[in-house]
Amino acid sequence: MKANYKKLWHILLDRDMKKKELAQMAGVSTYTINKLNKNDNVTVEFLGKICKALNCTLDDIMGSEEDGE
């Protein structure tokens, strides 16, 4: 099973926010945001920082899909 972050990108669109702005708000690097963009693995610590910055939960920013979808 693999994580995807489509929900996160929808939140950013809804809030008219750029990924770079999110990185600054959450105190994470743009490298981490790029990893999310590629659906790569990131630590729960980083996801928590993003959730805190956006005032949301993990369910609000990520989903899962079977490998190979």
Image (cartoon, helix red, strand yellow):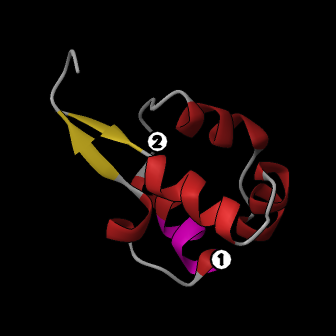
Q: Is residue 63 above or below residue 49?
A: above
- Above or below 25: residue 3: above
- Please give left or right for residue 44 compared with residue 30 in the image: left
Crowding at mark 2 (Cα within 10 Å: few <14, some 14-19, many 20+): few
The N terminus sits in image quarter? top left
Q: Which of the 4 quarters of the picture holds residue 61?
A: bottom left
Determine which quarter of the picture holds residue 40: top left
The quarter of the picture where residue 26 lies is bottom right
Q: Residue furthest front?
A: 14
Q: Nearer the viewer, residue 44 or 5?
A: 5
Amino acid at pointer 2: Val
Of 11 and 52, the residue lying toward us: 11
Disc assigned to residue 41: none
Could you tell me which residue is drawn at 56 percent across and 58 percent down?
Answer: 10
Which residue was labeled with disc 2? 42
- Sequence order check, earlier mark of 2 and 1: 2
From the viewer's perspective, is 14 left or right of 19?
A: left
The residue at the point 76 percent across, 56 percent down is 23
* In the displayed structure image, the side of residue 61 where residue 38 appears, left or right: right
Q: Which residues are magenta?
A: 48-53
Q: Residue furthest top?
A: 68
Q: From the viewer's perspective, is residue 57 above or below residue 55?
A: above
**Disc 1 secondary structure class:** helix
Q: Which residue is rendered at x = 76% and y = 50% of the image?
A: 19
Disc assigned to residue 53: 1
* Image location of residue 13, percent across then percent down: 68, 60
